[in-house]
Amino acid sequence: MKIKILTLFPNMFEGILGESILKRAIEAGICSVEVIDMRTYSLDKHHHVDDTPYGGGAGMVLACDVVDRAIEANSTSNTYKILMTPQGRPYHQEIAKELSSKDEILLICGHYEGFDERIREYVDDEISVGDYVLTGGELPAAILCDSIIRLLDHAIKKESSEDDSFSNGLLEYPQYTRPAEYKGSVVPEVLVNGNHKLIREFRLKESLRKTYLRRPDLLENRELTKEESKLLKEIQEELGKH
């Protein structure tokens, strides 16, 4: 997979791309990530990329001609172009899976007061990482890189990504490690008895419990299996809720 990022602040990506899973995936040739300074596509001698908005208002707006040139220079017919914007579709794990199957992705980071509206005509998708305000699209683009790359073959162990929260529509079950007892808190016995059938059932039930208590919205549109329905009923009875 090839990922390109158009940004006014390329140095913001040095840390995220130079550490942990992303660094190893890039070094192993699983993917490539290129960070491109949009200012190089400005024809102005001062490399201006923005201008005041028509109709007045506070702040500056990214100019459509600069961004268009940057997109054209870094795209092919195979490139999936994504605008990072709070007006985009809300990002979630299924979109990460969808994007991980693409061959080439171009992420376009906004800044200042936003984009010239005409820039939307040059992209294939618009994505938002949440209902809150950020200084620019760099952090959202980094989030997409992290969530997509870890899904690529050989980036991490397949079973690790399969157990992640949201990977199967549920929050992840609780995890424990040594010591078995710490400050009076003890690891559940089922996890240390070696019975893999009981361990699987425990993890599924606790995954359902966490989801039911913390993110019940995830269960609303989920088609539960017979086993999941039985376990969820047990959880509700244990909690005194029906």
Image: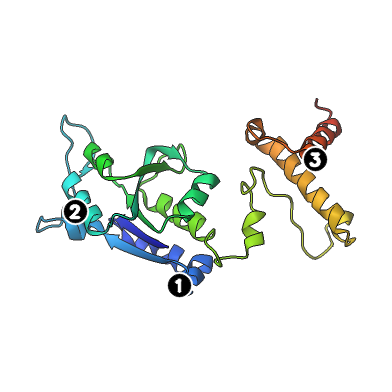
The residue identified by callout 3 is 227
**Residue closest to the eye, 185 or 49:** 49
- Residue 184, image x, y percentages: 86, 55
- Kind of residue sitting beneath label 3: Glu
State the image quarter where residue 191 is shown.
bottom right
Question: What amino acid does circle 1 point to?
Answer: Gly
Q: Residues within 10 Å of mark 2 (few under 14, many from 20)?
A: some
Label 1 sits on a secondary structure element that is: loop
- Local secondary structure at mark 2: helix
Image side of residue 235 versus residue 119, left or right: right
Q: Is residue 106 above or below residue 240?
A: below
Q: Is residue 29 left or right of residue 108?
A: right
Q: Secondary structure at mark 3?
A: helix
In the displayed structure, 217 sits above or below 77; it is above
CB contact under 8 Å: marks 1 and 3: no
| Residue 103 in view, yes or no | yes
| Rendered residue at 53%/68% (across/down) | 20
Residue at the image position 65 percent from the left and 46 percent from the top: 168
Look at mark 1 in the image and give the residue it sits on. Answer: 29
Residue 69, numbered label: 2
| Colour scheme of the rendered structure | rainbow
Q: Earlier in the sequence, mark 2 or mark 1?
A: 1
Of 190 and 183, the residue lying toward us: 190
Rendered residue at 80%/27% (across/down): 241
Question: Where residue 58 sits in the image (x, y, percent)?
Answer: 23, 35
Gap between marks 1 and 3 measured at Cα: 41 Å
Find out whether the residues at labels 2 and 3 contact each other: C-beta distance under 8 Å.
no
Residue 26 coordinates in the image, percent (x, y): 45, 70
Between disc 2 and disc 3, whose residue precedes?
A: 2
Measured as percent of width and height from the top left, residue 231 is found at 81, 38
Mark 3, residues whose alpha carbon is within 10 Å: few (<14), some, or many (≥20)? Answer: few
